[in-house]
Amino acid sequence: MMRRYLITLFSTLMVLGAYSVYAQVSHRLLSRSHTNHATAQRPIVHSVPSIGPRISQEMAEKYLPDAPWAVNARAKIRADGLHLFFNEKKLVNGNTEIEVSPVAMVWMADEEDGKVPSEKEPIVIRAEKATFVFDEAVELSEIRTRLIREIRMIGQVYIRGDDGLKVRGSNFVFSRDNKNISSYHPIDFRFQKHQGFANNIQINLEMRDGGAYADNPQVEAIKDILISEHLEMNLKPDEEESPVLVTCEGYFQYRFDSQLAILNRDVFVHRTDKTGLVDSLTCDSLALQFGEKLDAVPSENKTLGGSSNLELISLTATGDEVIAKSSANQLEAVGERLTYLLREKKLILQKNRGVEIEYRGADLFTPRLEIQVDDDQQPVFAKCDGPGQVKYLDKTAADSGQLIQQSAIPAILAQANWQESLTFMPDPNSQGQLDLVTLTGKAVLHSPVQQTGIISNSIKVWLKRIQLEAPVNASVNSSLSQKQDVRIVRTLAEQDVAVVSPYLEGEYESLDVYFDRQSVETLAALKGETPKTTDTSTSNNVISEPAEQTAAIKKRSSLQKVPKEPFKIDATHLTLQVVHDPKFKDVHVAHVKTEGIVKANGLIEDQEEPVHLEGQSVDIANGGDERQRFHLLGTDERFASIRSGEMRIDGIDLFLDRAQNFTRVMGGGAIEFPVKSNWNGEKLQQAQILEVSWKEQMRFEGRTAHFVGTVRATIGDSVITCEELKVHLDQPISLKSTSMTIKPQIASIECRDRVRFEMNQYENGVLVGIRYLDVWSYTMNQQTGAMNAQGPGVIEFWQRSNGKASLGLPQGMMGKSPSEKTPAKKSGWDYTRITFAGHMDGNYLKRQGTLHDRVNVLHGPVSEPLSRFGRDNRPPQSVWVQSQLLEVALREVPKDPKKPAEEQAPWSIEVQAKGNAEIEGDQFLAKADLVTFDQSNQMFTMRSLENRHATIWHYEHPQAARSRYDVKMIRISPDGNILELDRTLGASGSR
């Protein structure tokens, strides 16, 4: 728009050109050089009948076609380059004045010897009459040499010059005393295609007068041109541009020494284009600074007042209210000072209380605005200095009919505030593809409609301007704003950043947001939604629903998409990728990335319980609906973690995919989730947390969790440690579920490499049993009951003694439920240690198990749990068993109605030791092919197979004499009393 204002330059040039005629006339008539030249070169003559009239007649025919009388004028006088024509003359006031009428003058530059004649049009002046006033009486022949005091041009005066200059006025006066040429009557003028008028004019001159120049005053230069009262100009830059109206109600002044033009009081610049759109500038004072053209070639014979080498270099508008408006650009600016530097193509707006600018729906407020434009008048740099604000208003809503009865104040769509500066410039790193806007000093971006705000010490916004094709049926009134779209590409906030929105809250050192504009359909697909289409038109393209109703439906729809609470993320650095629809009414956070220590929590779409995230960095890919992928990084000292409900996963490198229901952790980590059964598959009345930690990696896929590297798994007081663990659940833990409160049961477990079980058993809060299992591998299917362990292995038990399990293979070994145990008097602790070199298999549900290869069993009483003893230091009432195979079975005992319930045991243990079996008690040592123990009758039985025999040594104590019996079968009580010998093959005794 400022380019159109610059044509104000022509106003000065027109006035300058019009009235330079009078300066040139005065110079020609009064110049000392002319007088000297005339005196020295040519003698004064009173008439030139042969030369003057012929040359003057040619001048009249060529340059005075609009004054045909001049060809046959009675008086034709040539004074060097001046040709003077008149018909009547009259000497008045004692010959001190000469009146001529009508009068015409053709003035062209002197044609000196050896010089090429000038190609410029001469200055042509016509007037009804003119009066030459002298200080003393003169003759007509002395008109060129006598002192002229004043020249009065009376009546209508016409002036024509080079470049189509035409001036029309009346009563022009040259005054030597006042050193000016003036007219206090209206004038109008044309210059090229421009025209204008004023109420008066005064041309002040720089003159040499007095002293040596008393009789020959010289006009050296025009000092300034002054027009008081009303000035009006209509400027037409070219055929394609509409004319520009410039008016001034005060005065216009052009100072030749400083080349400065000033229009003062009620200055108004106005332009209406072909479409009816208006541009205007209103101010109290308008200053136009001219200068020599940078590429101008100096002219030795530059005419007085000539301006061919001048150009406008700056424009300054000042006043209490400097108002610039452009309907085409939807711009209105109000300030106290507007400066435009043409060579730098720089515009500066200033106002102490703040410049107010409305531009394409935005309101800008700043004390100082500086704008740099390119050759196409497009902004390439802008800066707002000092505290400022910009608002984007929803003016369409304020103008709609539905708000007739409501407040017409438009809603604020977006707002930016800053304390130091706002700058706009091309991004140097985008090769001219993007523009960069920077806000500094407590910068704030706020969108009340989106309920979103960002505050930071510095905010940068990258914009991309898209040229749009005008629609085929576009009207001629389409503004420039409809042909260009500005899209936000990226926003970067740095230093003390805080964000508040329905979708995100947090504090950061930096926040980087990338924006991706997509169609409504593409955005719906990214979010996993199905776009709803509604036919809102009939076959005649008539809207079937009121606009107000459609807007209300859209508003309700958008409100329904707002989450219950924002996702809170606190991190050092946060990067977001936001996908939005063309109108920015629907947004989708497609990607989140953080650096530095991060804490985050909030609801994911369709989740009932919030998700909590912690780590050194977090990467979230959000595909909408249930399609989220989380990648969290931690350190050895501080794991990253993700928690939802009672489920928690920690790790150094943690990845979770909701859509695939998959979790992976590389490096060390831990996991927690509730289960409804223990390691033995027993259902728990109340769910307990399964906690697993590892050192190398973990994979979790719904039903199966696979852990590797120094694994430690805990349910309550039961612990498994191994190098590799697989836990299979009876139902998957769905990461896509709206609730993370699923509590599955353990279906099976697989343990490998240095497996150790540690299980504690409580009754009514009192410790009653401890079990340790150390094997190379262990598997158990809690659904089928099958279990298997690969040795070599060690099993240790501590349980409170009930005085009945003499062999010490407790019922707890088979995982019997504590609630099924019969309370007994607690008289101490029993310790059992079982080792085997082969493997162990069995079935938990069938209550049976088998241990293979070099099985050793050591059992006896101890004073407290975790106390141990060996075979060589067995305590009293202990027993040692060795065999190649050991079978253990837990049998249900029928209830005896004749006995009290508290004296009945519901279960009984049966043990069989096979293959080179040996048993040693306090008073006996026995060897047999088969040794059995039946808890129900408290009886040991030893048998031999085939032709072999069983042997028993019986003694009172280990140092006493022994009795040996070789038999096929022996029955003996736990206290060592022999109850039965079958088919004795021999007996002996020793002392």
Image: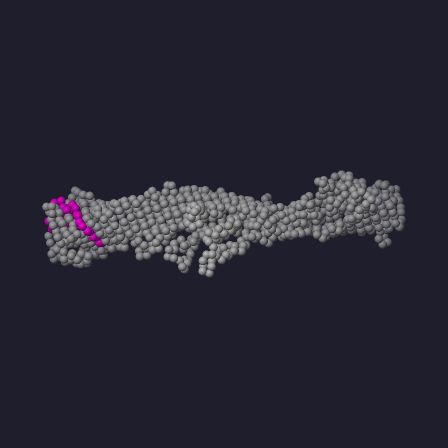
User: Residue at point 37% right, 57% down?
Assistant: 476
- Image coordinates of residue 837 in percent, x first then y, are 75, 50
Could you tell me which residue is drawn at 45 percent across and 60 percent down? Answer: 540
The question of residue 138 being in magenta is answered with: yes
- Relative horizontal placement of residue 646, taking residue 225 as reference (left or right): right
The C terminus lies in quadrant: top right
Residue lying at the far bottom in this picture: please name it: 539
Residue 585: x and y in percent read: 48, 51
State how many labels appear.
Answer: 0
**Residue at horizontal 43 percent and vertical 43 percent from the top:** 418
Relative side of 21 to 546, left or right: left
Q: Could you tell me residue 70's position as x and y percent? A: 16, 56
Q: Which residues are magenta?
A: 133-161
Pick the front one: 969 or 126: 126
Residue 920 in sight from this viewpoint? no
Q: How is the image coloured?
A: one colour
Q: Could you tell me which residue is drawn at 37 percent across and 52 percent down?
A: 328
The magenta stretch spans residue 93: no
Q: Is residue 808 visible?
A: yes
Along the line of sight, which residue is nearer the eye, 209 or 139? 139
In this orientation, which residue lies closer to the viewer: 26 or 878?
A: 26
Choose between 79 and 279: the one closer to the eye.
279
Q: Is residue 350 left or right of residue 570?
A: left
Q: Give residue 118's position: percent from left, percent from top.
A: 22, 56
Residue 475 occupies quadrant = bottom left
Residue farthest front in this picture? 405
